[in-house]
Image (cartoon, rainbow, N blue to C red):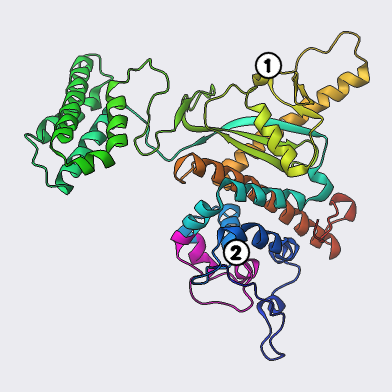
Amino acid sequence: MQTKASTVDQTSFLMPTLGEQLDPRQPLKQLADALPWPEFEQAFGKHYSAEGRPAKPVRLMVGLLLLKQMFNQGDETVVAAWVQNPYWQYFCGVSEFQWQLPCDPSDLVYFRQRVGETGMQRILKVTAQLHGDKAREKEVVVDTTVQEKNITHPTDTKLAHKIIRRCWKLADRNGVKLRRRYRKAVRQGVMVQRWRKDPKKRKAAHRALRKIKVIAGRLLRELERKLPAQVRSEQRQHFALYRRVLKQQPADRDKIYSLHEPQVYCMSKGKEHKKYEFGSKASVVMTKTHGVLVGAVAHEENLYDGAALRPALEQARAITGQQPAKAIVDRGYRGRKEVDGTEVLLPGKPKAGQSKRARAKMRARFRRRTAIEPVISHLKHQYRLIRCFLKGFVGDQVNLLLAAAAWNLKKWLRTAALFCLQLIGLIPSNQTPTVSFTRS
């Protein structure tokens, strides 16, 4: 059951509320007052039952998710830091300072699963609308990046070894006595892989890998014979995944790189320091002049950049309410001149007969396009996009949308801080942009 929102403004003169004790110039407090929290409660209310025990307030859960992403925290650390920070508590709608944890860290997992991608897109839309007309520019910059998954670097030896360990655990859990466990042979085969790149020991490593795969296949077939019918039915998808991993070859397409994240695929972006990345491709849409993120889409397949442009622009239209007139991209989007009424601009030689002013304008556009590169770097290193710890492809979507929302909020906080410095006269007014603290 959804908890009713608190309407307490002031308790008494001797006991002021938490909001009355805090500095009104603090940007995080101003952001808490500017965000339209009732919209979240109305949008997410359909996910709660009309009966039962009252759940945690929607504002508390949304606030914790935003604070976690804005300040690069984990589920456990953001809950622990919330107790120590009165501004964080006010941001989450608390009227009096609390000494106990706001919720169990696992509640954030359940809330993300309950709200899903649609709810996170609603959060991104609200954070973009907070910037007003700055988020409704006609020209946008689009680029792709890789959101890596929290998996180890995949090798055939690691995958086969994990299958063997899972077979051992499954046999022990169901009381199945294996004909042979091959512990010593598996341990020796894994040790030989340490010298796989040595020219003199390469053949021995390949032989050991083949033997490990054979052992994994034997254990898998033995379990299929000896396990009860109910357990075999429950493990049918896992066994199919194991057989697919053991049969795949280095040159195969759509390979499995992780047993617990089978949807992960391999991408090569041409980086000298990181040749291959394993995760999901992500498209980011940014307004050209003010740098507000109005789109963030995770792609379930490793699409060509031009094919990934349409879903990114569709999300930008859903968030801003208008179709971008121009999309400025890099040369990775070759082959696309127009997408659903949006003109695609790629860098290249100027058109014949183009005026000098038009050429200068195009050069300025493509110079501005490079601004999305540091934005993506900030998303990765400051807003938890560098490695996704959330489960499944839905976790990739949720993490990407929350990172984009955190960028928009931090951008609003920086503008609010500069505005406060301008008011107290520490910096000249002509060097800072003005900002309105009214709700958009």
The N terminus: image quadrant? bottom right
Residue located at (81% from left, 42% from top): 136
The three-letter amino acid code for the residue at tag 1 is Arg
Q: CA distance from mark 1 to mark 2?
A: 44 Å
In this figure, which residue is indicated by the disc labeled 1? 334
> Is residue 46 inside the magenta stretch?
no
Q: Which mark is residue 96?
A: none
- What residue span does the magenta drawing correspond to? 78-107
In this figure, which residue is indicated by the disc labeled 2? 58
Residue at the extreme top of the image, as rendered: 352
Q: Is residue 146 visible?
A: yes
The C terminus: image quadrant? bottom right
Residue located at (52% from left, 54% from top): 114
- Dividing the picture into quadrants, the one containing residue 160 is top left
Q: Which sits earlier in the primary sequence, circle 1 or circle 2? A: 2
| Secondary-structure class at tag 1 | loop
- How dense is the environment of label 1, judged by Cα within 10 Å: few (below 14), some, or many (20 and up)? some
Q: Is residue 10 above or below residue 227?
A: below
Q: Is residue 10 left or right of residue 103?
A: right
Q: Is residue 37 above or below residue 337?
A: below
- How dense is the environment of label 2, judged by Cα within 10 Å: few (below 14), some, or many (20 and up)? many
**Residue 245, position as x, y percentages in the image:** 31, 26
The three-letter amino acid code for the residue at tag 2 is Val
- Dividing the picture into quadrants, the one containing residue 6 is bottom right
- Dividing the picture into quadrants, the one containing residue 344 is top right
**Residue 94, position as x, y percentages in the image:** 62, 73
**Residue 268, position as x, y percentages in the image:** 50, 23
Residue located at (26% from left, 36% from top): 162
Q: Is residue 182 left or right of residue 209?
A: left
